[in-house]
């Protein structure tokens, strides 16, 4: 199992990996701590530390499986047989956004 973030032959990619992990962890921490107003151990810094640790753990153990699943969603195949020519991720995003826009325009009316 290779848990290195980047190829060691290019040291700047390792730095970029660390920057991406920290930046996205800070964004997720901001969302939970400030926007959702959740009480997290250690405040914002603690939330960032926990998010970074979780991101690294998930990346280390599930990176290949998640990448394979995302690639399958982008181009569904059964073995070598192409099941469809559509990108399932784009379809889900499009369906969600269209319903979100209609729901927003209706001013969140309930049934």
Image (cartoon, rainbow, N blue to C red):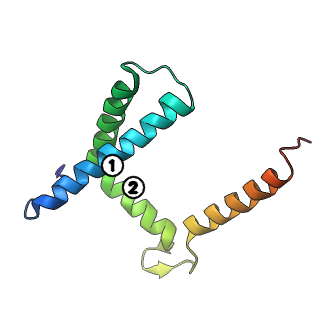
Look at mark 1 in the image and give the residue it sits on: 62
Indicate left or right for 94 with 8 as reference.
Answer: right
**Front residue of 66 and 34:** 34
State the quadrant of the C terminus.
Answer: top right
Measured along the vertical axis of the image, is residue 58 above or below residue 75? above
Quarter of the figure with residue 71: bottom left
Q: Residue 107's spot in the image, x, y percent?
A: 85, 47
- What percent of the width, then of the height, locates residue 56? 28, 42
Q: Regarding mark 2 in the picture, which secondary structure is present there?
A: helix
Residue 105 on image: x %, y %: 83, 54
Rendered image: mark on residue 11: none
Give the mark count.
2
Indicate left or right for 92 with 42 as reference: right
Answer yes or no: is residue 7 visible. no
- Left of 103 or right of it: where is 74? left
Which residue is identified by label 2?
66
Q: Residues within 10 Å of mark 1 (few under 14, many from 20)?
A: few
Residue in the foreground of this view, choosing between 63 and 35: 35
In this image, 3 relative to 32: left or right?
left
In the image, residue 40 sits, relative to residue 95, either above or below, namely above
* Front-lying residue, 82 or 94: 94
**Alpha carbon separation for disc pair 1 and 2:** 6 Å
Q: Residue at x 36, y 35 (%)?
A: 51
Q: Residue furthest right?
A: 111
Q: Residue at x 37, y 60 (%)?
A: 67
Q: Residues within 10 Å of mark 2 (few under 14, many from 20)?
A: few
* Mark 1 secondary-structure assignment: helix
Res. 87 visible in picture: yes
Residue drawn at (44%, 21%) of the image: 40
Residue 84 in the image: above or below residue 67: below
Coordinates of residue 110 in the picture (x, y in percent) = 89, 41
Circles 1, 2 touching at the beta carbon (< 8 Å): yes
């Amino acid at each position: 199992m290779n848990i290195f973030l980047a190829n060691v032959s290019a040291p700047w990619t390792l730095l970029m990996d660390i920057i991406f992990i920290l930046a996205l962890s800070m964004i997720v921490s901001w969302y939970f701590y400030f926007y959702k107003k959740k009480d997290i151990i250690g405040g914002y810094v603690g939330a960032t530390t926990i998010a970074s640790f979780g991101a690294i753990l998930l990346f280390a153990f599930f990176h290949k499986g998640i990448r394979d699943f995302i690639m399958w969603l982008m181009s569904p195949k059964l073995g070598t047989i192409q099941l469809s020519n559509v990108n399932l991720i784009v379809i889900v995003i499009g369906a969600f956004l269209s319903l979100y826009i209609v729901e927003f325009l209706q001013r969140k009316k309930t049934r």
